[in-house]
Amino acid sequence: MFRIGTTSYIIPAGILPNVRHLAGRVSDIQLVLFETDEQGSNLPDEALRCALRDEAARHGLSYTVHLPLDLRLADGGEAESRSLRQARRTIEATRGLDPYGYTLHLDATLLPPPWGACQSGALPLAIWREQAIRALAALSRWVPDPARLCIENLECADPDAFAPLFDRLPVSRTVDIGHLWLQGRDPVAALEAWLPRTRIVHLHGIGTRDHQSLRHVPHDRLAPLLRMLRDRFDGVLTLELFNEPDLAESLDAVRAAGEEVPA
C-alpha cells in the first residue's frame, strides 16, 4: 500500500509551518526547494533539519525532495556544471532527513522533435542521453543509494527519450500522472511498464492548468488508477498541489474513489 503525501506549500508559510499543518493528514511531505538570486534560498539549515526530524519522529512522516526546477541536467555545458553544484547543495542540505527519494527534471529543452520541442540548437538524441547519464552518475555519488534519484516524466518530452537511462543506471522513476494526461497518454498503461522502477507517483488534476484539485478528474478515470496503485505500489503517492482547498478536495476524491487514505 502506498504512502500518501503532498507538498510543503499548502499554506502560505515556510516549510516547518506546513509540515506541522499537514502532520496527521498525510504520511509524506515533498520538500519543494529553491535557491535563486531573486528569491533567495529555502534550503534547510541545521536548526530546521532538527525540527523536521522531530516532526517526522512524532508523526511517522517521511520526506521526499524535489530538486530545484531550473536545473539544466543533460545540458552538457557550464549550465550543467552550475546545476550539478546546486543539486549537490540541495542534497547535502537534506541528507540528514533521510529522504525517501529525490525527484529531478532532466533538461528537455535540447531534445529534438519528436522527442521534444526544440526546433533550433537541438542535440542529437544519443548525445543528449550520454550527457544525461553523465550528470546522473555525478548525482549518484552524493546520495545514499542511486535508486533514490527519481527521474520525472515531463509534459514537454516524450518519456521514451528517457527509457535507455534506466537500462544504464540504477535510478528510479517519479511518474507524474498529470503530465501523462496532458500528453493524452493512458497512465495505467504507462504504469504497467514503469511500476517496477517507480518510487514516487505525482497526482494532480487538470483544470484550467495542471496541479489542480482532483475534483477535475472523473471518477471512472481516477478509480482504476488508484486501484492499481493500491494493489501494486508501495512507494509514495504525492498529491502535487499548492493550496489547502485543492488538497482537501483531492483527499476527498481519493476516498470517494474507494481508496483508504493511509494514515
Image: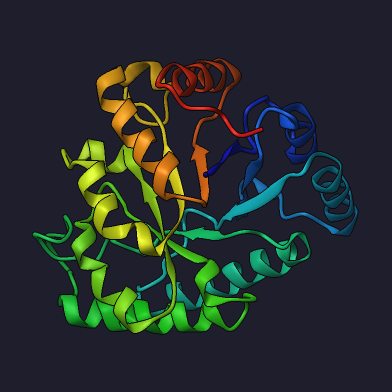
Q: How many labels does the image show?
A: 0
The answer to whether residue 130 shows anywhere in this view is: yes
Judged left or right of residue 43, residue 79 is: left
* Colouring style: rainbow
Q: Is 71 on the left-hand or right-hand side of 188?
A: right
Quadrant (top left, top right, bottom left, bottom right) of the C terminus: top right
Q: Where is residue 60 in the image (x, y as percent from the top left)?
A: 77, 44
Residue depicted at 75% across the width and 32% down the height = 23
Pick whichever, 231 or 99, lies toward us: 231
- Residue 17 lies, with reference to residue 248, above or below; the image says below
Residue 76 appears in the rendering: no
- State the image coordinates of residue 173 (x, y, percent, origin top left): 40, 61
Residue at image position (53%, 76%) is 146
In the displayed structure, would residue 66 be above or below residue 210?
Answer: below
Q: Which residue extends farthest front?
A: 231
Residue 14 left/right relative to 161: right
Residue 138 vs residue 142: left or right?
left
Most extreme residue toward the left is 114
Percent position (x, y) of residue 114?
A: 9, 59
**Residue 128 falls in image quadrant:** bottom left
The residue shown at (56%, 29%) is 261
User: Which residue occupies the foreground of this view, 147 or 41?
Assistant: 147
Figure quadrant of residue 28: top right
Which picture quadrant has residue 86? bottom right
**Residue drawn at 12 percent across, 60 percent down:** 119
Q: Position of residue 140 (x, y in %)?
A: 53, 79
Q: In this view, does 62 lie above or below 194?
A: above
